[in-house]
Amino acid sequence: MILTVTLNPSIDISYTISNLKLDTTNRTDKVSKTAGGKGINVTRVLHDLNKAVTATGFIGGNLGKAIVKDLNESGIQNDFLSIKGETRNCIAILHDNQQTEVLESGPTIADDEKLAFLNHFKALVSHANVITISGSLPNGLEDDYYAKLIQFANDSNKKIVLDTSKANLSSVLKSVQKPTVIKPNIEELSDLLGTEVSSDPDSLKSVLTNDLFSGIEWIVVSLGGDGAFAKHNNRFYKVNIPTIPVVNPVGSGDATVAGIASALEDKLDDIHLLKQAMTTGMLNAMESVTGHIATDHYDDLFNRVTVTEY
Ligand code: ATP
């Protein structure tokens, strides 16, 4: 199975309000509440792909219970560690063709919980072939916490896909514990390198040879509607995708991570891994629900992705 790690999950609330007014009351009956967080999106897409998947991370309080209930109702296996703090809400208000978000920072993880999760994770890793780690760390965990998780996974020779950014990512890149794959977008790469990175393939090819990335087997730079540029060991690939009817691209990076993890588990070759990663990303962008794909158009899209060695 594939193990997905979401250390700071949320209940994602979306309110649609046609004409949002400030400093007064707004009412709506267009409300959706679902389990969220980048790793939960990865989990749902893996489930849509019919892969065996288990979601883990920290949950707490009634909102934590709501996450488990939501996943159980979808038939998704999960094994979270319960904590004293309360799982967060993240609110998106869809109004006037705009999206305004309020993101709670979430609970602070206590020292005993921090240690307990390491043991919890270690036990789960033994049943997994591939592990995905997504999103930022909750308060209370040091930046090197992901490197600790990666060490357990590496000790058991498991494949790891890491999708995080800023200090959480740079801490892993500086550590001796390397994930198998990272999937930055251009903004995350620019943040990491402290300079504006261009999506031009020649410049990306040079950026990805930066010493910071040494020891990382796969780097898949996702480029939204422009596909991706990737490096696998010493090979570079430019990946082109067709134009598609985009409905909601939020979470497409998470769907791409799911495609990569599934391909790693199935030991697909480079071309097939990249085609699958792009196809799951595009399928997510064609749906209104974040972190969901309908697989009916899978083959059609997959066959229209082209991968060229660069
Ligand atoms: P997020 O943070 O919302 O999860 P991301 O920035 O990590 O997204 P993107 O590069 O936007 O990830 O998207 C990942 C993949 O999804 C792309 O490589 C592509 O295959 C597909 N995709 C995303 N946006 C579009 C789009 N507008 N048109 C076609 N495909 C898209």
Image (cartoon, rainbow, N blue to C red):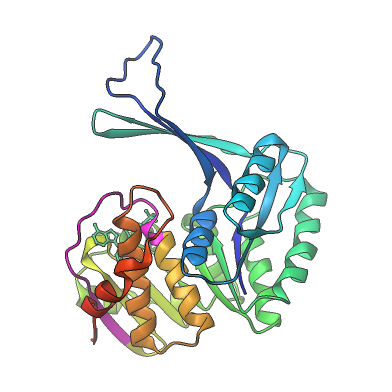
Q: Quadrant of the C terminus?
A: bottom left
Count the marks: 0
Q: In the figure, 169 relative to 230: above or below?
A: above
Residue at image point 33% right, 47% down: 288
Q: Nearer the viewer, residue 156 or 2?
A: 2
* x and y, in percent, of residue 41 in the image: 49, 55
Q: In the figure, 86 relative to 241: above or below?
A: above
Secondary structure mostly seen in the magenta stretch? loop
Left or right? Give the position of 256 relative to 150. Answer: left
The picture quadrant where one finds residue 192 is bottom left
What span is colored magenta in the figure? 236-253
Residue 212 visible from this viewpoint:
no
* x and y, in percent, of residue 97 in the image: 24, 33
**In the rendered structure, does residue 245 fall within the stretch colored magenta?**
yes
Q: In the figure, 49 relative to 216: above or below?
A: above
**In the rendered structure, does residue 78 fall within the stretch colored magenta?**
no
Q: What is the residue that sits farthest to the top in this orientation?
A: 24
Residue at image point 41% right, 23% down: 29
Left or right? Give the position of 259 relative to 55. Answer: left
